[in-house]
Every structure is written in C-alpha cells, then in structure tokens.
Image (cartoon, rainbow, N blue to C red):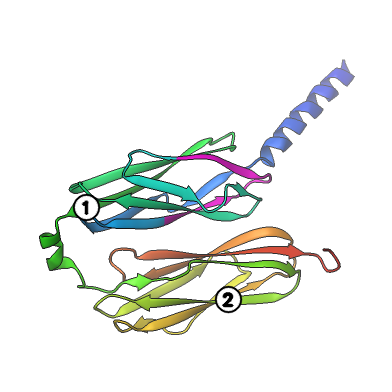
C-alpha cells in the first residue's frame, strides 16, 4: 500500500514538474491604439510575444478577425526566454470611424492555447485629417530588431539603433526601459527637432547566462500616435569551448 501511494505521489510530482516546465506565452501590451488613421492608409504595429516557460513555444496559427487585417509572426518557434514580433497590418481602405479589431494567436501553451491581440483606431477622411496631420512629433525606427548570433558567455556586446523625428514638433524621449539588468540602453540625446536623427546604443552582458535568449527595450516618448515603441535583441550564448 505504501509503495502504491509513493508511486502515485511520484506520478503527481512528475506531472506537476512537466507542467511547470511547459511553454508559456506572454504578450507585452496586448492592446494598441493607432489613433486617427487617414482613410486608405495602411498602418502597422509589432506586438512582442515572449516564451516565459521552460519548454519550446510553438505558434501554430495566427488569424485576424477581418480581411482588412494581416498578421505574421517573425518566428514560429521560441526557446525558453525568447521573444518574437507579430506584425499586424491594418488596411483602412473603404472604412470610416472607430475600428476595433482582434488577432487570434494559437500556440502549444496548454494553459492558454489561444490569446488575443487587440488594436483600435479611428479612420477619418482626408479633409478631416489635414487639420490634424503634422501637428506633433513622430518617432520613426528604421530597424527594431538585431540578432547578435552566437556569443561566448561573459562577453559584453552592443548594437546601435537609429531613430528619427519625422514630425513637425520637438520629439522628447521621456524614458528608455530594459527588460533585465543585463541590458543597458544609452541614448545619444533626449530631444530631437523635426527631421533630426538620434541613436540608442544597446549593450548586453552575457555573464552567467547561456542558451538562446531575447531582451526588449521600451522607448517612451511624446509621440501622440505611438507613445511606446520597442526594440528587440536576440542572442545565443555559448559556454567557452563549446561549438
């Protein structure tokens, strides 16, 4: 009897342990507001998806609630700790007024097999938009991702991202936040005049880390349309002497 109880206990522990190590999908900022969209304009946004579990996360399907929306993940399989972008594009042609759309993401996360990414916007006609356009700052990032590839553990690596103020008023970077203490982001300047460019140097310290990982940098600015934008870095950290 005692052996049977011990055996059942071991099975219970094994199941609980496997569940603990299973994949887990987490989304930063699952809701995005595009604000005013000029009718006919195509707008895009990257949702950041992270695997915070202990096993590989596999994205099996991404579907949108209407034909006006397209969504595509940069990667479909994420190692523990790894992130990817799901790029969502909305075509406002033939639409007007308030828009609320949903993108459904299906994965092998047993506890949360389907998540929702939501975005809103207000489609306005060109003549209405003319009154509002070019009246504020606009943060543009030509590239939002960088892969360091394979790096030996202990090294500090860095990459420089560029950004530009494409608006008509001064752009102010209010804050730059990193997702962990191993990552640092150095800003060239906090205020940019219209048309001016700046840089963000992202450093990653690989000490005491191993395997595939990704980290995020959040840029918070006074851009009225997109006050938060994200940078993502990827790396595979190898122990010294490994291939």
* Of the pair 17 and 222, the residue shown nearer to us: 222
Res 138 → quadrant: bottom left
> Mark 2 = which residue?
159
Percent across and percent down for residue 68 are 31, 44
Dot 2: within a 10 Å radius of its alpha carbon, few (fewer than 14), some, or many (20 or more) residues?
some
**Marks 1 and 2, Cα distance to the nearest angstrom?**
36 Å
Q: Which label's residue is closer to the chain start, 1 or 2?
A: 1
> Mark 1 = which residue?
122
Image height of 159 relative to 124, above or below? below
Q: Is residue 158 left or right of residue 163?
A: right
Q: Which residues are magenta?
A: 46-62
Res 60 → quadrant: top right
For residue 93, which numbered disc appears in the image?
none
Q: Is residue 189 left or right of residue 168?
A: right
Q: Are marks 1 and 2 in contact (CB under 8 Å)?
A: no
Instruction: Tell me the chief SS of the magenta region.
Output: strand
């Amino acid at each position: 009897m005692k052996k049977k109880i011990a055996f059942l206990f071991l099975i219970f522990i094994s199941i609980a342990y496997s569940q603990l190590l299973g994949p887990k999908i987490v989304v930063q900022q699952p809701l995005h507001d595009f604000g005013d969209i000029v009718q006919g304009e195509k707008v895009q946004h990257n949702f950041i998806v992270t695997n915070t579990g202990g096993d590989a996360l596999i994205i099996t399907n991404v579907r949108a609630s209407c034909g006006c929306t397209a969504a595509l993940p940069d990667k479909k399989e994420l190692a523990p700790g790894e992130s990817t972008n799901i790029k969502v594009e909305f075509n406002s042609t033939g639409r007007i007024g308030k828009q609320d759309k949903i993108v459904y993401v299906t994965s092998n996360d047993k506890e949360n097999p389907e998540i929702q990414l939501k975005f809103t916007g207000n489609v306005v006609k060109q003549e209405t938009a003319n009154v509002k356009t070019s009246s504020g700052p606009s943060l543009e990032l030509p590239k939002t991702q960088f892969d360091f590839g394979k790096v030996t553990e202990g090294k500090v690596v860095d990459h420089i991202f560029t950004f530009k103020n494409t608006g008509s008023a001064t752009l102010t970077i209010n804050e730059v936040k990193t997702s962990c203490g191993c990552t640092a982001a150095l800003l060239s300047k906090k205020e940019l005049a219209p048309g001016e460019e700046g840089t963000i140097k992202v450093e990653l310290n690989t000490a005491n880390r191993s395997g595939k990982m990704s980290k995020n940098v959040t840029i918070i600015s006074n851009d009225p349309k997109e006050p938060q934008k994200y940078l993502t870095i990827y790396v595979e950290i190898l122990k010294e002497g490994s291939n």
